[in-house]
Amino acid sequence: MTQQRVRRSSWGGLFVAVLGLVLGTGVARAELPATAVSTGAPDQGNPRVEAALLTDVSQVKPGDSFRVGVRFRMDPGWHIYWKNPGESGLASEIVWDTPGTTVGELQWPLPITFRSPDGFITSYGYAEEVLLFAEARASEQMTGSLQLSAASDILVCEQRCLPAQLMLTRHIPVGPETRKDPEFAAAFDAARASVPVTPESAGHVVSLALDTKPLTAGQPFTGTFTVTAPQGQPAPVVEKDFFIPDRIKGIARVELAPVAGKPGTFKLEGTVAQDVPAQEPRLAGVLRLGTAASGYRALTLDLALAPVVAAPPGTAPAAPVVKAAPVVKPPTVGTAVASESSLSLGLVLLFAFLGGALLNLMPCVFPVLALKAYGFTRTVHAERGKVALHALAYAGGIIGSLLALALVVLALRAGGSSVGWGFQFQEPLFVAAVAAVLVAFALNLFGVFTVGTDGTALVEKVDSSHGLARSAGEGVLAVVLATPCSAPLLGTAVGFALAAGPATVLATFFMLGLGLALPFCLLVLVPGLTKLLPKPGAWMERGKQLLGFALLGTTVWLVWVMGGLTGVDGMARLLAFLAVVGLGAWMYGLAQGAEGGRKVAGVVAVVAVLAVGGVLSLRFEETGPALRKASAVAEAQPWDEAAVAAALEAGQPVFVDFTADWCLTCKFNERTVLTREEVRAAFAQHKVAFFVADWTRRDERISAKLAEFGRAGVPMYLVVSPAAPDKPEVLPELLTTDSVIEAVRRAAERVADAT
Amino acid sequence: MKTLISAVALAVMLPVVALAADTAQVGKPAPAFTLKDEAGKEHSLAQYKGKIVVLEWTNSDCPFVQRHYTANTMQKTLAGFDAKKVVWLAVDSTASHTPDKVAAWKKEKGFTYSVLQDASGTVGKSYGAKTTPHMYVIDEQGVLRYAGAIDDDPRGNKKEGTTNYVKTAVDALLSGKPVPATSSEPYGCSVKYKS
């Protein structure tokens, strides 16, 4: 007993724990009879749980009430389950056998929320220690002693799960008076304090307003839930995992999300189960108010929801159909949101083709196109057949690398990941690799080194086989640079493809390549066009060098992207690496002038410099703080579902800008449209809440949101009206001032109509 | 250009975010899949069109699965169906499981249906499989008709009157009637997905 009292201080607890280890656990629980303690869930001979049958009395007077319970102590990392185990597990169960004693309903202290490492599975339960207990009353006629027996059926899980059935039994003497056991009474009091109470008994008022009644089987529903603290108390605040729902008959899923800026107000979202329940479902569960710092208060929730009706025929999944005709959906053109179901494959391929063609106009592909035009001028005056070959090589490079990209996407998907368009630019090493290629390419154009026999050779003597390889290489480069520029129509097409089967993915990427290669191939196919090109001459050498600067300009942008990904350090490391690449290119140029052994030694030295330089500089810490960029729009807030909900709740139209540093289309839109005075004035006039969802780094929430709209990449622009929060308008990838102002006005006007 | 190709290859190594896949919903077409079984043979949902397909998420380490395999629940349920009309496929989304381990377990328990290998968890997540066992019944047209537990006896201590939801659902489909209970709370261990 004295040992147990010492436990109140943490040092004492440690002392007891050490003592327990030294002397064996038998000593620490000497006051409990052996039959009242048991261990279970043996894990290679090691029990993972210890159960003890406890009472808060050491003697009972006939007719008196007392408390009886089972205390479970789990090994570190192991847990047992609440009465609603959640998405996996098994509710803990205690069956009483207490002749002459009535035992009431089991009381469940507030559980905690467990999630699988990937966040996919949520369950509720207890770690470390919990006392599940009940009120009991000894019969008036009792004499001698009370026999108390409890059979526990629990599932003890860590990564693995071990079921345990534990039988516990003990006797409590019956006497002329009830004697509290101070040690265990305290344990019961502590457990009692964490059992959720009804809002009424805590002086709180709760209410629920559903947006639609009745509920429809299989359909989602929404509502607003409020909880008000007693007068004079601050409004209730909550922390993560504050709501633990019961298993509600007829409801498949229910979630509460706090509404930002309005403590005590929650957005209710749920889905009704497929089957109509016999009884009206209720919103049942536990609400944990307060914070770890202020302490928690747990309330039980039990509010009527609404009756559930069957879905009307047509909308409901019908009973087995005898013959399901293949569904042919008419292509719908002109809708802003083209969800995958409303797109036919043919339309997607058309979109992909047009999107690819439009990519040529995007700022990312321009340097390559210019390069190609230069090379083309050089070869155009050669025989026509060769020109066609170059076009073919260029298109082949484009299509080949796009198909390679498609295969990468498919491989990643088969490996369990999903990827979006432009995802490579979320990887610092990829950005570094592209920057290095650009710098090397630019230095080549400056004449620092030559590739093969090209360069110093006369234009007329260009080795055609090498020229073809170069054309193919330029095609590859065009693709690499094109990915961060999501052209109009492209987002939808690629989004659709990524969600579809492998054949569709390959077909879509193929069409995309055809589109991208189109303008150049057109030049070849239309004979008259080639004659419009200027004659080759000395200007070409200058033009070539000038193009080198265009490539360096693109490198500047990549350095900036790197800053967003990895901060100042990452930028410096990239620049250091690029300097090494430059040094390597220069040394290679020198080696090219040498002969025999010296040439080989030179090339070895280049490889050594690049390898050492690369190893030393290419270490990017994505965890490092990103450079804070001044947001394009001053009033921008970081995107967050809860904050969006709060703004809508407050009656504000919402504009969400899904963007990324490496997305040039996004940056273009921000500079040319979103920052314009008229747009800002319109935003201010309609009190638009402006959110920025930055996808520069990987962000699962943003990827999921994009996928929701059938998109695989940024940019995406959503305009949400508070009058129709579930029907956001998706703006086209290329914004215009008018389209943004109009969309915002429509969103604001819907409010006016609704109110 | 070799640098470029290696740069593309580099993208393969990216640990890329997982998009929220559209999950299986009763009444909607069941998510398509192609998986290899423990013997390396490929199975795709599409190839079983015209038959009723029962999917059983399984994990031989899970006590709940072990209980059902000791009691032959799955085998007995399957034996009650017309073999020409119903296909039973177990799916193992346990990240740590290898085909060898599964094959050994299959031999030990002596059942004949294939155990599809989904160590990446892609298919499991597309079905929203949370527990082992977690059962799905797909009709002849490929539409999901039941998702949930195998029966209404999570603890395995019911003496009699257990309802086998999968049997009920398949029997209803075979006789052209609507499935009486299209979903139930699955019970068991959590699926040990790759994380």
Image (cartoon, coloured by chain):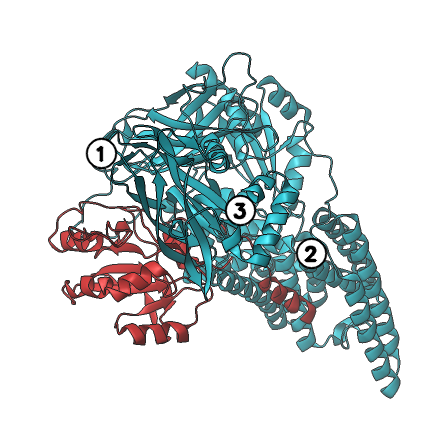
Q: How far apart are marks 3 and 2 (CA)?
A: 18 Å
- Disc 3: CA contacts within 10 A as few (<14), some (14-19) or many (>=20): many
Where residue A601 appears, as percent x and y from the top left, is 86, 82
Where residue B179 appears, as percent x and y from the top left, is 18, 47
| Res A561 label | none
Looking at the picture, tell me which residue is in the foreground, A102 or A263: A102
Q: What residue type is labelled 1?
A: Ala
Residue indicated by mark 3 = A703
**Res. A635 visible in picture:** yes
Q: Which chain carries label 2?
A: A
Q: How far apart are marks 1 and 3 (CA)?
A: 34 Å
The secondary structure type at the circle numbered 3 is helix
Where residue B195 appears, as percent x and y from the top left, is 51, 57
Q: Chain A is drawn in which colour?
A: cyan
Residue indicated by mark 2 = A428
Q: Quadrant of residue A269?
A: top left
Q: Which chain carries label 3?
A: A
Q: Residue at left 13%, top 48%?
A: B177
**Res. B41 visible in picture:** no
Dots 1 and 2 on the same chain: yes
Q: Residue at left 66%, top 36%?
A: A670
- Disc 1: CA contacts within 10 A as few (<14), some (14-19) or many (>=20): some
Q: Quadrant of residue B64?
A: bottom left
Between tags 1 and 3, which lies in front? 1
Quadrant of image for the C terminus of chain A: top left
Whether residues under marks 1 and 3 lie with C-beta atoms below 8 angstroms apart, the answer is: no
Q: What residue type is labelled 3?
A: Ser
Looking at the picture, tell me which residue is in the foreground, A8 or A411: A8
On the rendered structure, is A446 left or right of A689? right
| Res A310 label | 1
